[in-house]
């Protein structure tokens, strides 16, 4: 799966990591619903860290279509709230 972090680039992440990403995504979604800035910041940092460390960074000139697009690390809770769909940032 190709995952783009807005403003950073793309990573190729094996599908075996999707369950863990979905758990991290659920934590971000819960924090947004609760309006908990601290939990939101920690959750976003953990989600993006998982993609960066478990995935393989693609070259900047790669033309791969992204299967999933995540907000940048400096996204606000309001910006992420606007991006959340029915299935969160990471669809099941």
Image (cartoon, rainbow, N blue to C red):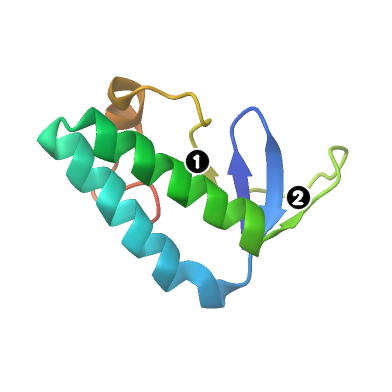
* Numbered disc 2: secondary structure: loop
**Which residue appears at 47% of the width and 69% of the height?**
18
Vertical placement of residue 11 versus 34, above or below = below
Vertical placement of residue 25 versus 83, above or below = below
**Which residue appears at 54% of the width and 78% of the height?**
16
Q: Is residue 62 visible?
A: yes
Q: Nearer the viewer, residue 90 or 25?
A: 25
**Which residue appears at 52% of the width and 46% of the height?**
48
Q: Tell me: 10 left or right of 40.
A: right
Q: Position of residue 78 (x, y in %)?
A: 28, 21
- Tag in front: 1 or 2: 1
**Which residue appears at 43% of the width and 61% of the height?**
21
Name the N-terminal-most of marks 1 and 2.
2
Q: Tell me: 50 left or right of 47.
A: right
Q: Residue under label 2, please give it.
A: 64
Q: Residue under label 1, please give it.
A: 70
Q: Is residue 67 visible?
A: no
Badge 1 crowding class, 10 Å Cα cut-off, few under 14, some 14 to 19, many 20 or more, is many
């Amino acid at each position: 799966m190709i995952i783009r972090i807005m403003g950073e680039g793309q990573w190729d992440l094996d599908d075996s990591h999707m369950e863990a990403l979905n758990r991290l995504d659920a934590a971000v979604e819960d924090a947004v619903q609760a309006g908990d800035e601290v939990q939101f910041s920690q959750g976003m940092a953990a989600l993006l860290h998982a993609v960066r460390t478990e995935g393989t960074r693609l070259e900047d000139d790669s033309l791969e279509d992204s299967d999933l697009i995540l907000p940048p690390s400096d996204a606000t809770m309001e910006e992420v709230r606007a991006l959340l769909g029915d299935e969160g940032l990471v669809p099941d």
